Amino acid sequence: MSDSFRGVADDAGYAFSYEGPLHEVFPALHDAQRAWLSRIDSLPAPDRKTHELIRMVCLAAAGNNAGVEHHAGLAAEVGASWEEVLGSIMLSVPSFGLARAVSAMPAARAGWEAGHDGAESDRDE
């Protein structure tokens, strides 16, 4: 994943670059947002791979390539193949257009490769 997406506040335990500045100004709002996102992440269905693919496609439709990269990496970590990541993005073409899908592909590939490489190194240990 790109360093700009991972965030400047990694040492504080934040996953996203916007979290540090948000926490500095609105700590209670930031804490509530993290709790809310944690609840979404803990939904029992769909399975984790499908969950990450759905979130990735929603971010592709929104034009948020940093988010695409992040969720493609998470999808890879839980076993999504490159074909599943790419196919999920392509399913959005009828609704959101080819341009959004094509612009998301490099970010998805970078995220998938980072997640896939990380998952493989975890299995090797």
Image (cartoon, rainbow, N blue to C red):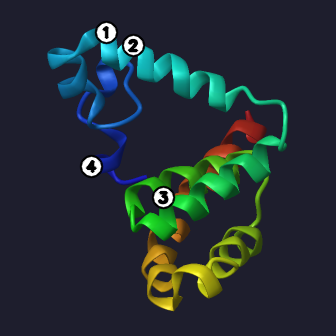
Q: Amino acid at mark 1?
A: Ala
Mark positioned earlier in the residue sequence (1 or 3) = 1
In the picture of the structure, the residue carrying the numbered disc 1 is 28
Q: Amino acid at mark 4?
A: Ser
Q: Residues within 10 Å of mark 3 (few under 14, many from 20)?
A: many
For the residues carrying marks 1 and 3, which lies nearer the camera in this image? 1
Above or below for 41 versus 56: above
What label sits on residue 31 in the rendered view? 2
Q: Inspect this view and state whether residue 113 appears.
A: no
Q: Is residue 81 left or right of residue 25?
A: right
Residue 118, horizontal then vertical, whole percent: 61, 45
Q: Earlier in the sequence, mark 1 or mark 4?
A: 4
Q: Is residue 116 above or below residue 44?
A: below
Q: Tell me if I can see residue 9 in this picture.
A: yes
First of labels 3, 2 by sequence position: 2
Task: Name the residue nearer the viewer: 34 or 117.
Answer: 34
**Residue 102 vs residue 6: left or right?**
right
